[in-house]
Amino acid sequence: MKNIKLISLCLVFFLIFGGMLSAQKTEAEKEKARQLYEKAKKFIYQKNYVIAVDTLKQVMKNYSKSVYLDDSLYWISYSMHKYSSELDSLEKQLKMQEEAVTYLNSLINNYSSSSWVDEAKILRIELAEDLYNKGLGKYKTYINDSAGQVIIYDPEKAKKAEDPDTELKLVALSALMNMDAEKAFPILQKTLRDNKNPKIRERALFVLSQSKDSKVVPLMVELATKDPDKKVKEMAIFWLGQRRGKESIDALIKIYKGATDSKTKEKLIFSMSQNKSKKAQNKLIDIAKNEKDAKAREQAIFWLGQKKDDAVIALLIKLYDGETDRRIKDKLIYAFSQSKKTKATDKLFDIARKEKDVKIREQAIFWLGQKRDDRTLELFIQLYNESADMKIKDKLIFGFSQNRSTKAIDKLFDIAKNDKDVKAREQAIFWLGQKKDDRILDLLIQLYDAATDSKLKDKLIYGFSQNRSTKARNKLFDIVKNDKDMKAREQAIFWLGQYKGDEIVDILADFYFKADSAKIKTKIIHSISQNKSEKAIDRLIEIARKEKDIKVKKQVIFWLGQSKSEKAMKFLREIIEK
């Protein structure tokens, strides 16, 4: 009896221990399979497809029951597809692509619940199309099987962001259109006419647009005029514009004739602009000249302005001369600005000189200022010297600022130094201050030393603050120390406070102890407080300890309280505990 019990215990022990060993072995196998699969994926990301294929074959051979088998089947097919395009022999390409199809068939047939099945079907169509185009007619069956049915509207699938069945059919239809348009066209036509989901019709329309078949244009016209969805209509108009044939521009002109809303007209005008024919250009000219819809005219003018044609520029000039609408004139000026033709630039010069409407002159000057050539600069100098209108002067000063030539800088300096209009001088100083140039900085310092007007000084101080050179900073220090104008000193202190670094903190603190005005001291305290360094805290604490003026001392304590520094908190506790 005891022997029987002992044998039973041994059996139980071996069963339990054997099970544990088996489980451990299974987990170890899983981990090895995972590591090998991840290694293969890494090779794919690196586009090292040969090693990826070899590694995935190891996964499939050594871990045939692994959870990574269906993934491996997809990725080995993907890698073979990619690698086949690198092979120099057609025979090798076909062999590898056919092997990839075999793996995809295995995935689709044996792992129907896999998340990779939909991707595999799409990849199989791509491979089948390529193999068919290389002479292997038997692969057409994969495309026929997927594309040979109308895409039916399913309300439940329509709610999903992606519908794999629809995606597959559309990819297959695209391939079939390239291989056998006669067979694919009726299916696509029925889908575009009957499917209630506009997103599917959009996708089907894209497939249609890739075909060069003559039957495509009438169907696109039908969609552009009759489809119930606005976006599908607009897409049909867009794709008509991408076709270069006579029938497409005729269709666009016909649709335009019946169009009533501005948005549709805008889309049609864009599509016409993409067609390089004379007929398309003439229609745009007709719209620019005669259309009652101002927005449509503006669009036509815009697209005409992109054309490199002397006759078009001559027409736009003629349009401008007879135009009274300011918005249309603005569009014409922009069109001239985009042209490199001498006639267009001459017209801008003419408008800048003679146009009675100041705002339109400003527009012409602005666009001329973008050209940055010597001829434009000469005109700007001439216009500036003749002009009394400050708005025109502003635009010309901006034009000088965009021109990097010595002559333009000299003109800005001349304005800053000699112009009787203070606002013009301020504008010139502002733009000079944006330039990081030692010569300009020297000119600004000369101007400052001769200046008496506070507003001009403000502008010059701001100019120094924008130039981060040591020379500019030293000028700000000089103003703080020596300028008798209190406002100028305050401004210099403020801008010095925007600089970073311990050196600035020390200089400002040293100024503080020499300052003879509570107002200047307050400004220095604020500037030091803007520097978030430990040095700034140390110097503020020093000022707080030494300052006898209670009002000024309160300011220091206030800014220390804003700092959230441990040193500052400790100092404030000292004051409280006294």
Image (cartoon, helix red, strand yellow):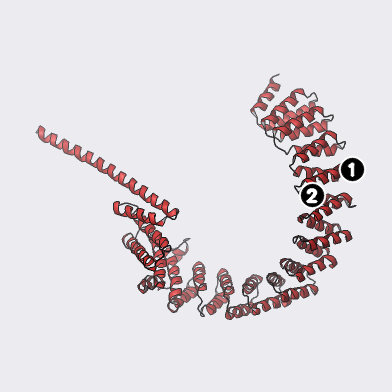
Q: CA distance from mark 1 to mark 2?
A: 19 Å
Earlier sequence position, callout 1 versus callout 2:
2
Residue for point 67% across, 30% down: 534
> Percent position (x, y) of residue 386?
89, 61
- Compared to 564, does 491 lie above or below? below
User: Which residue, as the protein is rendered here, is positioned at the far left?
Assistant: 1
Q: Is residue 167 left or right of residue 319?
A: left
> Percent position (x, y) of residue 569?
66, 26
Q: CB under 8 Å between callouts 1 and 2?
A: no
Q: Is residue 261 left or right of residue 111?
A: right
**Res 432 label:** 2
Characterize the local packing of mark 2: few (<14), some (14-19) or many (20 or more) Cα atoms within 10 angstroms. Answer: many
Q: Work out whether residue 218 or residue 82 is closer to the camera in this orientation and state it.
A: 82
Q: Would residue 151 be seen by someone viewing this image from the given angle?
A: no
> Percent position (x, y) of residue 365?
79, 62
Give, as a three-letter code, the residue at label 2: Leu
Characterize the local packing of mark 1: few (<14), some (14-19) or many (20 or more) Cα atoms within 10 angstroms. Answer: few
- Compared to 108, does 220 lie above or below? below
- Compared to 154, does 404 lie above or below? above
